[in-house]
Image (cartoon, rainbow, N blue to C red):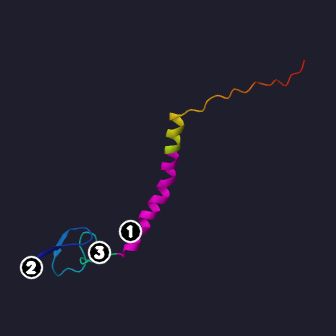
């Protein structure tokens, strides 16, 4: 009787075991199609992109502050 690692969690199980005693998944594993991995990566990018865009915008504003405008001040009070 030999031990073989679970393809999901890596725990060593007996050779004839069908379900891993540690994680509960089949020891041979039922791997998901690669489309799940690509969808997960795309979702992470979609959620992280606005954050990083805002961060870059904030850094650029800190490096180059807006110059005050040299427009004459107009008073509403007439003499």
Mark 1 vs mark 2: give the one in front. 1
N-terminal of the pair, mark 1 or mark 3, is: 3
Per the model, the C-alpha gap separating discs 1 and 3 is: 19 Å
Q: What's drawn in magenta, residue-wise?
A: 32-55
Q: Nearer the viewer, residue 52 or 74?
A: 74
In this view, 74 is above or below 8: above
Asked if the residues shown at circle 1 and circle 2 are in contact, with their CB atoms under 8 angstroms apart, the answer is: no
Q: Residue furthest right?
A: 79
Q: Main secondary structure of the magenta part?
A: helix
Per the model, the C-alpha gap separating discs 1 and 2 is: 35 Å
Q: Which residue is mark 1?
A: 37
Instruction: Check disc 1: other Cα within 10 Å, few if <14, some if 14-19, many if 20+.
Output: few
Q: Nearer the viewer, residue 70 or 12?
A: 70
Q: Quadrant of residue 78?
A: top right
Dot 1 lies on which element? helix
Q: Is residue 5 left or right of residue 47?
A: left
Q: Which mark is residue 25?
A: 3
Image quadrant where one finds the N terminus: bottom left
Q: Which residue is mark 2?
A: 1
Mark 1 vs mark 3: give the one in front. 1
Instruction: Check disc 3: other Cα within 10 Å, few if <14, some if 14-19, many if 20+.
Output: some
């Amino acid at each position: 009787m030999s031990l073989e690692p679970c393809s999901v969690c890596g725990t060593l199980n007996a050779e004839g075991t069908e379900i891993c005693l540690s994680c509960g998944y089949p020891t041979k594993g039922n791997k998901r199609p690669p489309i799940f991995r690509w969808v997960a990566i795309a979702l992470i990018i979609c959620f992280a992109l606005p954050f990083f865009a805002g961060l870059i915008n904030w850094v650029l504003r800190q490096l180059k502050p807006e110059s005050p405008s040299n427009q004459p001040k107009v008073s509403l009070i007439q003499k």
